[in-house]
Amino acid sequence: MTQLEKAKRGVTTEEVKKVALEEGVDVETVRSRVAAGKIVIPANKNRKSKIVGIGKGLRTKINASIGTSTDIADILMEVEKAKVAEQHGADTLMDLSVGGDVRGIRRAIMEAINLPIGTVPLYEAFAIAIEKYGAAVDMPEELLWDVLETQCEEGVAFMAIHCGINLMTIERLKKQGYRYGGLVSKGGSYLTAWMLHNNKENPLYEKFDRVVEILKKHDVVLSLGNGFRAGAIHDSTDRVQIQELIINCELAEIGRNMGCQTMVEGPGHIPIDEIEANVLLEKKMSGGSPFYMLGPITTDIAPGYDHITSAIGAALSSAYGADFICYVTPAEHLGLPFPEDVKQGVITARIAAYIGDMVKLKKRDRDKEMSIARRDLDWHKQFELAIAKDEAVRIRSERQPSAEDSCTMCGQFCASRILKGMFDNEIRNGGKC
Ligand code: SF4
């Protein structure tokens, strides 16, 4: 049985207890939300990994995506990137490798870290098809099912599967006209090409029951992929994106009713005034399935800083109710990320998720502690509370102040030092403390 099926029967699993303890949420609340499909716990039966809950009332989680390309396929670097992501606080990791020994790379990553691992199985299927048959469009359908089964057996915890693309969504794309940014999802583009070339319906949509049954057997979370996500600001929230979202939300409900843990993926590139609507649509149409936002990137014009453009989108998404955020690295749109890019991406996404949670969960105690530590010039405490402690320590230690308790920003004009001891430190709650 899956976590969802057990929860529906009133069983409180060890995983539910761990999530409740970790999040400081009542155990019964977590169980009932798992039963309702509002929380998922990626915990494939075939691999032990860190237990992470994603969904309503829980801290916004962040995913780091790594993986080889056909241009750079260095297994050691991918393992290093996985370790960097785990070390800097990613909650999950997706291996999106398409170059080199894809299966071997995934296995090496799984051995190296303890995070739940996600994949896009279409990538491996198309990579094998190109190698064996010369072209992705020549992929035999059975290959896709084999890859799904194998990845589940290996212990993949969640899978982004593009079930929501069908002939109707392709027709919608044709009717609305092609896009400013085209299609930017590898899975979405290749699957569309496969369908058009073979003049066939998407097997992942047509045989959705089969997808669910395979994933259910191993309790893999089905993440309904956003193959037609907008990859440009001027394409956001267009008809084809919403068409796919509607289908994915329908499928999320069907999958959930069949006992499979499901979540829905969202775009992509969105201006900040459309983020709330995107979250609202997903939540209402799916019946509260966890929403996995890919960024979103909030402007197209800052290559090199897309970890920042996406952090702005991620903070707002989380504040409006998104549950899971895929990080973006500074290398986005430019090249394959290196380990330092992964580090920057993870830290930036964690900050964004935390800012979102300050609104969504009203958790602001850590900020209060930091304010007091700053006022009192308690540097040790400030570093303890910092999301990226090492960076904070590095910057301060490179700039030795003349007075030990202040810093070189204001030097002798330290505003905190001059008033230290002149007020008692008792906080009175007449204001809003
Ligand atoms: S020197 Fe300025 S920036 Fe530094 S701790 Fe004092 S008030 Fe803050």
Image (cartoon, rainbow, N blue to C red):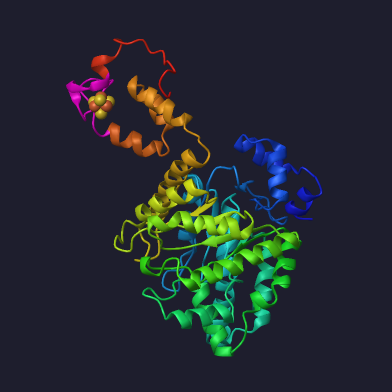
Residue at 28% across / 20% down in the picture? 405
State which quarter of the image contains the N terminus.
Answer: bottom right
Q: Is residue 407 shown to the viewer in this render?
A: no
Q: How far across and how far down the image is residue 120, in percent?
A: 57, 67
Q: How far across and how far down the image is residue 29, in percent?
A: 69, 40
User: Is residue 399 shown above or below 108?
Assistant: above
State which quarter of the image contains the C terminus.
Answer: top left
User: Is residue 81 shown above or below 15?
Assistant: below
Q: What is the quadrant of residue 248 in the picture?
A: bottom right
Q: What is the quadrant of residue 263 in the picture?
A: bottom right
Q: How far across and how far down the image is residue 192, in percent?
A: 53, 80
In this view, which residue lies farthest toward the right? 9
Q: How far across and how far down the image is residue 7, in percent?
A: 76, 48
Write down the region rendered in magenta. 398-416
- Magenta: main secondary structure: loop
In the displayed structure image, the side of residue 398 where residue 194 appears, left or right: right
